[in-house]
Image: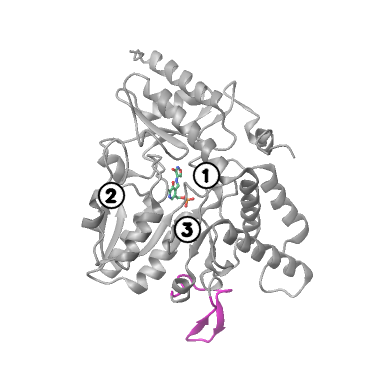
Amino acid sequence: MPSPWLRIRDEFPILHQEVNGHPLVYLDNAATTQKPRAVMAALDRFYERDNANVHRGLHALSMRATDAYEGARSRVATFVNAEAPEEIVFTRGTTESINLVASSWGGANLRKGDVILLTEMEHHSNLVPWQLVAQRTGATLRYLPVTGDDGLLDLSQLDRVLTPEVRVFAFTHVSNTLGTINPVADLCARARRVGAVTVIDAAQSIGHMPVDVRAIGCDFLAFSGHKMASVTGIGALYGRKALLDAMPPWQGGGGMISNVDFFESRWKPTPERFEAGTPNFGDAVALGAACDFLDTLGREEIRRHDGALARLAYERLSALPGIRVLGPKGERGGLVSFAFESLHAHDVVTFADEDGIALRGGHHCNQPLMRRLGLTSTARASFYVYNEEREVDALVASLRRTLKFFGLQG
Ligand code: 7TS
């Protein structure tokens, strides 16, 4: 059988277009990835044949839709190596998954005197939900620092911050600004020793490398479908069953109750307890198809491919004048952020767009980290399975053109 990598770009129709008179070079994959034909076809097939509301009908289509939805749950469970499908709660994505944990687990378990431990490299979606629950419960926030330009977690500080008052330790697997891959299994083991619950933000790892919740040993793990070749509006929260079982609902409505009276109700078991209202079953099917697509490519291979492009970009960009390239020099996730001393990131991104290159510029929802690094914004190139070395060349050529335009070629 030919390798699925050989014709990978044919799987992504959107790549075959020109932007501003140049072939599109899509390097904004950390924001959202493109979707392969197989995922779009699964969505079409579902809506052309099986669509009906789930968990309520006794008719054929509703049963087929329910099977498709629960099949997707099982597929996602095997994708992250959960013990059971019940450990997968479908959500709108990483942000909603973290809000669910912070609101439901945090609301029920945190009190004054408790500490929520985060790191300085968290995305706003792994900061703000914890700030909200801290305000509600009287718990306080504490941070594990990041080392300077290398952008690693400062593990020499871990014993100082990971004290017995820490009830929950929430951290990202891969930083969306630095590209750092954190030692998540070690961090979970350390947290367990003080009895802290662990929450992993896997938004930037789930589509790029093997993610095995049992090998990692985490309690919760949050991710988004749209960053792993699936569609927007669907994602998941993995939660260890014993923890999910003990958590109260966070939204009320149809589908999550076993019995409702005028003054009180009883909840269904997990995961339905956390899925009030009609769930996003169509997009869940697309998420299951994306799991198949990524496993066909092989997640180790994806890690190697994306990491190699990011390291190449890191090296090539480091040779440009007046540039600061962020994050670790060696092993990194599939992205690289950079800032020029004398150029605003928005100018860099606008000039790249003229050359058909899609980058992201800004604070990447990492404002506290940016301040810590003495920056207000960076430009970022982020890679996925369909990117090629020639696209790193195109990026470097475009940046040279921009530097020349501003008289900064050194
Ligand atoms: N966590 C991390 C580490 C992220 O990179 C993102 C999105 C999120 C959480 C939130 O994911 P969502 O799907 O719920 O929105 N990051 C980015 C980014 O870097 N550029 O655009 C979105």
Q: CA distance from mark 3 to mark 1?
A: 17 Å
Residue 84 in the image, given as x and y percentages of width and height: 57, 68
Q: Is residue 343 positioned above or below 101 on the image? A: above
Q: Nearer the viewer, mark 3 or mark 1?
A: 3
Query: For numbered disc 3, what is the local secondary structure?
Result: helix
Query: What kind of residue is marked 2?
Result: Leu
Q: Which residue is mark 2?
A: 155
Circles 3, 1 touching at the beta carbon (< 8 Å): no
Magenta-colored span? 247-269
Residue found 37% across the figure and 20% down from its top: 319
Horizontal arrangement in the rendering, residue 45 relative to residue 308 (left or right): right
Q: The disc labelled 3 sits on which kind of residue?
A: Ala
Question: For the point 31% across and 37% down, which residue is it?
Answer: 150
Q: Earlier in the sequence, mark 3 or mark 1?
A: 1
**Does residue 259 show up magenta in the picture?**
yes
Q: Which residue is mark 1?
A: 208
Image coords of residue 73 (percent x, y): 61, 63
- Nearer to us in this view, 213 or 372: 213
Label for residue 215?
Answer: 3
Q: Dot 2, how many residues are within 10 Å of its Cα: few (below 14), some (14-19), or many (20+)?
A: some
Local crowd size for mark 1, using a 10 Å CA cut-off: few (<14), some (14–19), many (≥20)? many
Q: In the rendered structure, are the residues bearing label 3 and label 2 in contact, judged by CB atoms less than 8 Å apart?
A: no
Amino acid type, residue under disc 1 in the picture: His
Residue 95 seen anywhere in this rendered image of the structure? yes
Label 3: how many residues lie within 10 Å, few (<14), some (14-19) or many (20+)? few
